[in-house]
Amino acid sequence: MQTESYSERKPINRAKIMVVDDDPDLRQVLSLRLRANNYDTVSVCDGYSAIAMAQKEKPHLIILDLGLPAGDGFAVLKNLQDYPALSVIPVVVLTARDPEGNKRRTLESGAVAFFQKPADNGELLEAIRISLQIGGWRGLPS
Amino acid sequence: MNNGQAHVLLIEDNPGDADLVRLRLVESQSDVHVNCVTRLSDALASLEVETPSLVLLDLELPDSHGAETFRRIMRKAPNVPVVILSGHDDEALAIKAVHMGVQDYLIKGDITSKHLERALRYAVERQGLLRALEVTGKQQIELKNQFLSHVSHELRTPLTCIHQYITLLLDGLDGPMLPDQTDHLKTVLKSVNQLHAMIRDLLEASRADSGKLRIELRCIDIGGLVRQAIAMMRPTAAEKQVGLEAVLDPAIPLVFADPDRALEVLINLIDNGIKFTPPDGSVVVRVSLVETDPVAVYLSVTDSGCGIPQVSLPQVFERLYQDPNAVDGNRVGLGLGLYIAKEIVTLHGGRMWAVSEAGSGSTFSFTLPIYPLAKLLLPVITHKGRLREEIVLVRVELTPLSKSLRGSWKETCEQCLDLLGKCIYVDKDFVLPPLGSSGLVETFFIVASTDMRRVSIMLDRIRAQIGAVPRLKASGTLQVTAEIIPALPAADLRNLEQQIRGVADHVTEIIQRGLTSKQNLTEKENHKHAN
């Protein structure tokens, strides 16, 4: 894991990750962690904004909570599938909900990985790295 | 019997008694329908098609006697009130029946219509109350579980936030920290992890209560699993200067269990053992077979700690049990660990018990079922009562490109296993259940009795079918190999059973060797990860 400070200057051509979570503190700390690992981040707090922001920002990957206002995680997964341009974005689910029942359902709805909060940072970052590779992102290695 | 027509099933083989009771019934209330049968088998058949409001039952029938009669009726229709028609001479049995859930009994000679009417009405009322209680109880458990599930979800959210900020600081992302600060934060992280474990246990226990605990059975090499548990717990033991070792019987067959759950049980028992053992003491894990019990493997964890007083032994598996003598200042947790462990073992069809003497340590033992490989191989490796000259063991190995993607790798493997079932010759070949290991490399074995030419067709089919699974193409690689296992020469009927066991042992050995090498790889990886 890289340990450089997240305030470092931005290299160009980095993968962009969108964090969708209704908890502002968690959005912030996740973004800090991702930026420290050389990703660009945008974040939104609800299901409706998630789709709007995805269309505007075209992120390379989405980290998605399930319990959200204005369209929960499942609704977001479904809506993403409805737009060809968005349906190819890999989605990593990060939720406090129980894997039982939810895990299978999210994977069947198009997510590439499921993590229950609190997740191990190493595993989460590895899943993000691999998902970006599979998703065809050919930017700078993180 | 206040709403609508009463429907009474009268089970009585003496026509005189039957007529009398029927008469009294009709006298007691006008709107009653009586269905009279003379044999238990007829009664059971009748209960199959309709549910009466009450059963009136003579215990001595042509095809059933005594206690067995009401037991079978109550098993068939647990929610229908039963009133027994008893003679003077078997009143004791009737009283026993009441203890076991029968609503009431009537002495045949003493039945008056008034008496009968009251007995029947009360029987129906009481049964109704019991049902209502049962339903309320179930509703309350359901409400409690919903509550716990909600609470644990809500607790996880702030806990995640704490966890994230602590690891951010510990990883130096906010700049370097002083050694003391790092130490203190590590203590906070440890507490956060304890809280996390408690929330998990709470949810697990409530699942166990409502029978929602799930296990996924696999063939496992229990020796490998024990070694893994020991490797995981070694740091904890070393920190407390407690010795930790395994004593494994080399002839342990494959076990049919959920590897994650079995590991959880082992870790729990070892952790407890270490917790209650003073420095320089020891914890020993044993795996053995017991001659009198050919279907189970026996596992035990023995510590040299303070032991458990005889009076407390029956309580240790109860939820929320806390050892009153836990003196070393360790936080004891919620007291759900052993309760969950026992539930997990019970779910596997195993048993769990503890033996201890105050002052001289405790032994916690449990059993897990043996995977009956020899029995399952029988139809595949025999042909017309003789052992086949050879069988083929096909190994299908799925390796993920990376050790992450835990999220979907398991599902990918499940999908491949489903497809595997479609690649074999159903009556000739046999797909073993998935092998358990905590590693991510998934190995499936097929025991095949088809000849080599057809095996090669099977291999091609497997490569084409499974190789085409999109998720596997994206995240892993496939390797298919086959190995011929020759049977012993001169196969004949006399020692067939012995020979099948020989082949099963041979297959088991190959599988275990495969699992062990994989295990070592996983341990190495874990080790690498830990550094």
Image: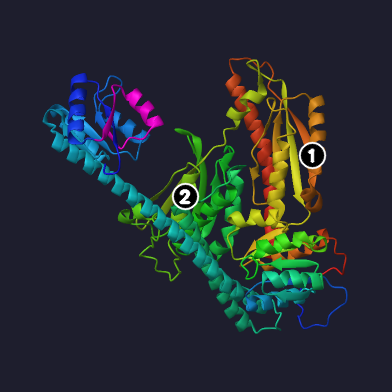
Q: Which percent across, then down, holds residue B90?
A: 17, 29
Q: Which residue is mark 1?
A: B465
Q: For residue B40, what is the image quadrant?
A: top left
Task: Say if the magenta span includes residue B400.
Answer: no
Q: Is residue B130 above or below residue A54?
A: above
The magenta stretch spans residue B47: yes
Label of residue B195 in the image: none
Residue occupying image coordinates x 55% and y 47%: B215
Q: Tell me if residue B514 comes above or below residue B13 in the rendering.
A: below
- Using the numbered discs, state the Cα–Cα distance from disc 1 to disc 2 in whole angstroms: 37 Å
B214 to the left or right of B482? left
Whether residue B303 is visible to the viewer of this picture, yes or no, is: no
Write down the quadrant of residue B397 in the picture: top right
Examine the rendered structure and indicate whether residue B35 appears above or below residue A123.
above
Indicate which disc, 1 or 2, sits on the residue closer to the N terminus: 2
The percent coordinates of residue B213 (x first, y second) are 51, 51
Label 1 secondary element:
helix
User: Which kind of residue does numbered mark 1 sit on?
Assistant: Gln
Q: Which residue shows up at 67% across the image and 49% down it?
A: B519
The residue segment tinted magenta is B31-55
Provide the chain ID for the residue under circle 2.
Answer: B
Q: Residue at x 54, y 54 (%)?
A: B264
Say which residue label 2 marks. B211
Q: Secondary structure at mark 2?
A: loop
